[in-house]
Image (spheres, coloured by chain):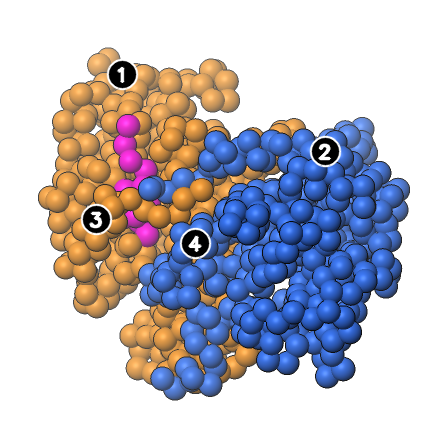
Amino acid sequence: MDFRLTEQHEALRSEIRACIDAHIDDEVIERAHRTGANHCVELAKALGDSGLLAQAMPGEGQDPMAMWMLSSEAEKAGAPFDSVGMALVIAGVLNEAGTAAQNQRVTAALLAGEEFVCFGLTEPDGGSDLPAITTRAVRDGDEWVINGSKMWTTMAQVSDWVFLLTRTDSNAGRYGGFTVFIIPMDTPGITIDPIHTMSTERSNATFYDDVRVGDEWVVGEANEGWRVVSIMFGFERGMANTGALTPLLARFGKWAEASGVIADPVHRERMAQVAIDAQVAELLTQRTAWTAAVGEPSGTEGSIAKVFATEAYQRHARWAQAAAGPEGLLGLNEPGAATDGWIDHDVRHSVPQTFQGGTTEINRNNIAERHLNLPRAR
Amino acid sequence: MALDFSLSVDQEAIADAFGAFFAAESPIDVVRGAEPLGYSPRLWQKLGSLEAPGMSVPPHAGGGGATLSDLVVVAEALGESIAPVPLVEHWVASRAYPTPEIVSGDQIAAIALRPADAEGIWRLVPGGAVAGVVVGVDGDELVAVHSSAPMVSPRNHGSAPLADRSARGGQRVVLGEAADLDRYLDLWRVLTAAALVGIAERAMRMGVDYVLERHQFGRPIGSFQSIQHGLADLPALVDGGRFLAHKAAWAFDAGLVDGAGVIDMDEGNITEFAPLAAMALVHAADAAAVSTDRSLHYHGGYGFSLEYDIQLYFRRARGWANIIGDLSLQRRRLADLLWGRAEATAGR
């Protein structure tokens, strides 16, 4: 085994870091938390202009290390990066399954960091059981007419596009009869209702009333949409959002030194454990990227990394808050807040990590069935 | 050089050869037959015929000159079979004191993990019950002491060949200063971590096999989600332990020791050997403890009975790790390596 990045990867990491440093400051971070959009147009544009987004797009023939480095550097800097991460996933899906015209119109704009996309997958009654969705697209002449609603369409308010999963044939079996569309958000009939959350992040419910679109916005084949979302899940899982322990520990360590808490052996013991779990999370994530790079993904590495990293993040964020006492309760940038309030943010932000992008339970099913070869339990 | 999570071609060959060796020569009845002492002279002899005891010693001292990464591969195979031989201790002690008899394996060497007490006794030395030479710290010195192996061990949790050994009661060779022990302890940490990863891996597999075979309510219990999810947490622990042990070994083999590597807590970038070795041991100890615990639990009462093999793994998971002392103190020691010693860092 070898744990050293190539010189090219080190150079790429420096370039990513410089780009993030040039566009992220306290004000940008504060704005993201105030508006609820984990989104920074200037950063996205700069990453797009320098070709870093095109490099980091997931997919065959691409370098998965680039996506991991982009995500992990953004996490370390506390940069509002979610909208870019989502754009990269959809760019990768369109690159693999979309038409030339879609790639020219949509993928290019996503990779330029100029346009953004939200995920229209989950519904009020279809979350982990995604095939249970009821949003329908019905043929009407040359057009499709879409009716239904989606939950957790985070970033819809800043998006130019929605990547929308619909039912087009209810008699085609559990995984048949789905169609995926990529649709301009300003298409008549789409409305957005905000959902405010206990972290600063805003999500949305989106509604689709007689939304009419042409065949040019179908991604892949009609009724073959499950193949398209499967590509997406392969990209989404386990290479991003697994690096939160490093900034948590870095900030806590600085606070512990300044406050003198670092002399307490009990706290030192736990800090050491956080450092171990941070290393393990990073190694498992790097392994996910590496198996994708050598073309041997079993499909469970991402689940293994995600479950471990997100559970450890929750566990240690809650410990850090308790360890910091009353000052650990104060919010971002409040005077006197331990770690300038990042601990409070981490406790909040770590909550959805164990359900968004695939719940811990769905990932455990995946590991049990496909890694340990246990029988299907549902 | 680039990130690579696969074994080299040579290491694959080593893994296959030692995997096959331990499967053939240390099946579970050999492990059981060696209890309670935890030592099979016959197995040790066979390892000697493969020149395994001298693997860790550099060629100029007559040894095999294996890298630490190669030794990690063998130690994991040993752990998978819970082979009743003190190979890890012997490898570490022989790096400090490579006499021809030790390199050949004709004489077993052990390493005292704790300094000799006021009476000049090394307490509960792993491998100490069967070793003719013990390497350890006595006062200011690192010494090797030749004396006869007692060949008995107090009954202990992991059925390990432990013994109290005198640091003063035999032929005594001064090897260096007390502080020199640290580097040998780090080798022990990495190799013991690898052996514990082998235990964790095998215990997980035994659990999976058992829940597929055991039927209740008309179905294999492995089809129940509650059991699946308990097992599904284990691959992260096992793989994490394996990668940490290999990363530590990689750092050692690349010379990233004594400050040549990186410890950057802002970036989460750690390539220095000593903290990686500490991390590997603590994590692998946890992984082996959790994996054997869950696997035994899913065996129900059978797992608790001596007849079933999982209890052998459960006990060694704890016995092989805790012999270095309270793992909480190992974590505090890791904190010293990462942030400096407590009194030096507060209020900085």
**Is disc 1 surrounded by few (<14), some (14 to 19) or many (20+) residues within 10 Å?**
few
Q: CA distance from mark 3 to mark 1?
A: 53 Å
For mark 4, give the secondary structure: helix
Q: Which residue is mark 1?
A: A140
The image quadrant of residue B231 is top right
Q: Which residues are magenta?
A: A61-72
Q: Quadrant of the N terminus of chain A?
A: top left
For mark 1, give the secondary structure: strand
Q: Chain of mark 1?
A: A
Under mark 4, the amino acid is Ala
Q: Chain of mark 4?
A: B
For mark 2, give the secondary structure: helix
x, y percentage for residue B230? 65, 45
Q: CA distance from mark 1 to mark 4?
A: 64 Å
Q: Residue at x 43, y 76 (%)?
A: B340
The image quadrant of residue B326 is bottom right
Under mark 3, the amino acid is Ala
**Is disc 4 surrounded by few (<14), some (14 to 19) or many (20+) residues within 10 Å?**
many
Q: Which residue is mark 3?
A: A11
Do the numbered discs 2 and 3 sit on residues whose CB atoms are within 8 Å? no
Q: Residue at x 63, y 67 (%)?
A: B327
Q: Which mark is residue B251?
A: 4
- Sequence-wise first label, 3 or 1: 3
B91 left or right of B302 in image:
left
Q: B60 or A165: which is nearer to us?
A: B60
Do the numbered discs 2 and 1 sit on residues whose CB atoms are within 8 Å? no
Q: Which mark is residue B23?
A: 2
Q: CA distance from mark 4 to mark 3?
A: 21 Å
Label 2 or label 1, whichever lies nearer to me, is 2
For mark 3, give the secondary structure: helix
- Tell me, by letter, which chain the rendering colours blue: B
